[in-house]
Amino acid sequence: MDEFRKIAVLDNMVEAQLLNSMLNEQEIPHVMRTYHDSAYDGLFQVSMGWGHVEAPEGHRAEILAILEDLRTRSENI
């Protein structure tokens, strides 16, 4: 099994959910990690982003392309 590596920082929960859905549809192995910490009431998410996506290095380019497409579409709404 390939080692999972941090691929990209995600801006918010909606972006994370959309990316998660698209990666699942394309059967790309991945894990979403949130920076939320209930002890600090989400303080880290303000400075660091919602969280990040981890995946095998071989899927980096594909995931970044999907994420870029999502971000471009959301800017045009």
Image (cartoon, grey):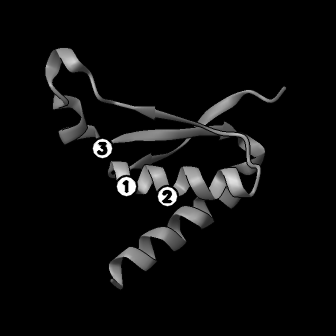
Please state, as top left, top right, bottom left or bottom right, where the N terminus lies in the image. top right
- Residue at 80% across, 30% down: 2
Indicate the amino acid at tag 1.
Val
Kind of residue at disc 2: Leu
Q: Amino acid at mark 3?
A: Gly
Q: Quick one: SS at disc 3?
A: loop
Q: Which quadrant holds residue 39?
A: top left
Verify CB contact (< 8 Å) between mark 1 and mark 2: yes
Residue closest to the far top: 39
Looking at the rendered image, the disc whose residue lies closer to the viewer, 2 or 3, is 2
Q: Is residue 9 above or below residue 77?
A: above
Looking at the image, residue 45 lies above or below residue 41: below
Instruction: Residue 8: give x, y in percent of width and height.
Output: 50, 47
Residue 23: give x, y in percent of width and height. 65, 53
Q: Which mark is residue 18?
A: 2
Is residue 40 shown above or below 53?
above
Residue designated by label 3: 49
Q: Which residue is mark 1?
A: 14
